[in-house]
Amino acid sequence: MQLIIETGGKQYVVSPGEVVRVEKLPGEVGAEVEVPVKAAFNEGAMVSIHSTKATIVGSGRGDKVVVFKFKRKKQYKKTIGHRQSFSEIKVGEVVA
């Protein structure tokens, strides 16, 4: 069975038991969260499912992305960095 879940404004194709890295979710490690399901497929046929339960197995921050702004002939240079927070969730049972 494959599910298309939506969290953090993004969609992910997952299967039950799979660990996925998504945008930061509220809750501690070990907490159970309910994730909405956009669509579910079982052997190619679409199935009606509204949500699934997932467990937060980890959280952290991703690698640093360097942002460099530059305007030629104006002596303008600016360098900043960004690290995005994430949560790792393990997709569990399907709630009909």
Image (cartoon, rainbow, N blue to C red):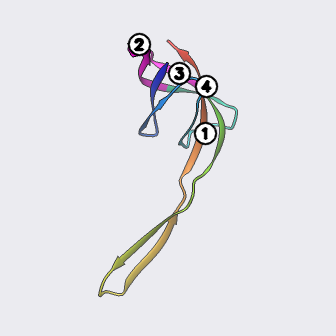
Element carrying mark 1? strand
Residue with the mark numbered 1: 88
Percent across and percent down for residue 5 are 46, 29
Q: Is residue 85 magenta?
A: no
Q: Amino acid at mark 1?
A: Glu
Find numbered disc 4 in the image and state the secondary structure of the residue it sits on.
Answer: loop
- The amino acid at mark 3 is Thr
Query: Which tag, 2 or 4, sits closer to the chain's start?
Result: 4
Which residue lies at the image location 36% right of the left edge and 87% below the top edge? 75
Find residue 89 and report its horizontal and vertical position in percent.
60, 34
**If you read the primary sequence from the N terminus, does the residue marked by circle 1 or circle 4 appear first?**
4
Q: Nearer the viewer, mark 1 or mark 4?
A: 4
Give neighbour class at mark 2: few <14, some 14-19, many 20+ (Cα, 10 Å).
few
Mark 1 Cα shell of 10 Å, populated few (<14), some (14-19), many (≥20): many
Residue at x-position 31% and y-position 86%: 74
Q: x%, y% of residue 16?
A: 57, 23
Query: In the drawing, does residue 43 fall left or right of residue 32?
Result: left
Q: Secondary structure at mark 2?
A: loop
Q: How far separated are the C-alphas under marks 3 and 2? A: 12 Å
Q: Secondary structure at mark 3?
A: strand
On whether residue 38 falls in the magenta region, the answer is: yes
Based on the displayed image, in which of its 4 quarters is residue 27 positioned?
top right
Task: Give the magenta part as a residue range.
Answer: 36-54
Viewer-side residue, 1 vs 66: 1
Q: Main secondary structure of the magenta part?
A: strand
Rounded to the nearest angstrom, the CA distance separating label 1 from label 2 is: 26 Å
Residue, disc 4: 17
Q: Which of marks 4 and 3 precedes in the sequence? A: 4
Residue 52, labelled with which disc? 3
Q: How far apart, in angstroms, are the residues tagged by discs 1 and 4?
A: 12 Å
In three-dimensional space, the C-alpha distance between marks 2 and 4, rounded to whole angstroms, equals 19 Å
